[in-house]
Amino acid sequence: MSQNNKNSDNNTRSTWRVDVMSLYPEMFPGSLGLSIAGRALENNIWSINGTQIRDFAEGKHKNVDDTPTGGGAGMVLRADVLAKCIDAVQQPGDTRPLIYLSPRGKMLDQKRVRELCDGDGIILLCGRFEGVDQRLLDHKNIEEISIGDYILSGGEVAALTLLDACVRLLPEVMGSKHSGDDESFENDLLEYPHYTKPRVWQGLEAPEVLRSGDHGKIAKWRKAQAEKITKAKRPDLWAKYDAKH
């Protein structure tokens, strides 16, 4: 399964290439085939190719997993099967990072997202069951990334989340190159509150300063609000921001 439009006139940079290895490659591009990510996919700003892990298993039943060595519940994805899949996807000279979506991984943050966007693309391995044989992670030097302290049925939803965070930052996807500058986490702060019409709703009025037309005052108010919200809701982020400023 692949999504790639060869007729694009986007010549600003090479296509940001994604390969996903999964037992359910049909889950991709999923929601990323819609909205701004979908338009970017049609315009060849990025491409995605799904690879079925089971295609690299042997035997009548194409088993990709086995019982844990030492006993225990669940099943573990086999290193030999996954290695064959990776070798087929990651050709010699391919410098894209190889990432395994895992609750044991380093927490994904905006800094890592931007680093990934600046490269040629990524290769993603989506786990299932109890995870993958540790020897594969060690042998292939795979980067482990987590999207939060909770458990999902598999790595596919986590992969979609990571891809969504990356694709929206690719050149031309959001339109203005400054569209994401003030968003949460970009400057170690949560985003300031937003308001729109009507001016008064349910007896609540949008802040007068935002209607003043004074861009200096508006910028100062937004920064103060972002600092206030971050300090109250994310003291960990605030400590990081406060140390810098």
Image (cartoon, grey):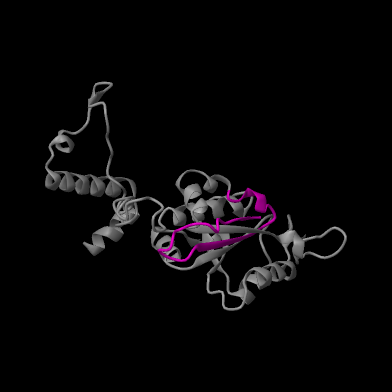
Q: Camera-side residue: 84 or 130?
A: 84
Image location (x, y in percent) of residue 202:
28, 21
What residue sits 25% from the left and 63% below the top? 243
Image location (x, y in percent) of residue 237:
33, 55
Count how many numbered circles sit on residues in the image: 0
| Most distant residue in the bottom direction | 93
- The quadrant the N terminus occupies is bottom right
| Picture layout, residue 38 above or below residue 196 | below
| Left or right, residue 197 beside residue 109 | left
| Picture layout, residue 228 above or below residue 65 | above
What residue sits 24% from the left and 49% below the top? 227
Image location (x, y in percent) of residue 157:
57, 50
- The quadrant the C terminus occupies is bottom left
What residue sits 67% from the left and 63% below the top? 132
Q: Camera-side residue: 37 or 180?
A: 37
- In which quarter of the view is residue 31 placed? top right
| Most distant residue in the top direction | 202
Image location (x, y in percent) of residue 241:
27, 59
- Whether residue 197 is in magenta: the answer is no
Q: Camera-side residue: 159 or 75?
A: 159
| Picture layout, residue 146 above or below residue 217 | below
- Whether residue 3 is in magenta: the answer is yes
| Left or right, residue 27 beside residue 244 | right
What residue sits 82% from the left and 65% below the top? 58
Q: Is residue 71 visible?
A: no
Q: Which residues are magenta?
A: 1-29
Q: Is residue 10 visible?
A: yes
| Left or right, residue 233 beside residue 80 | left
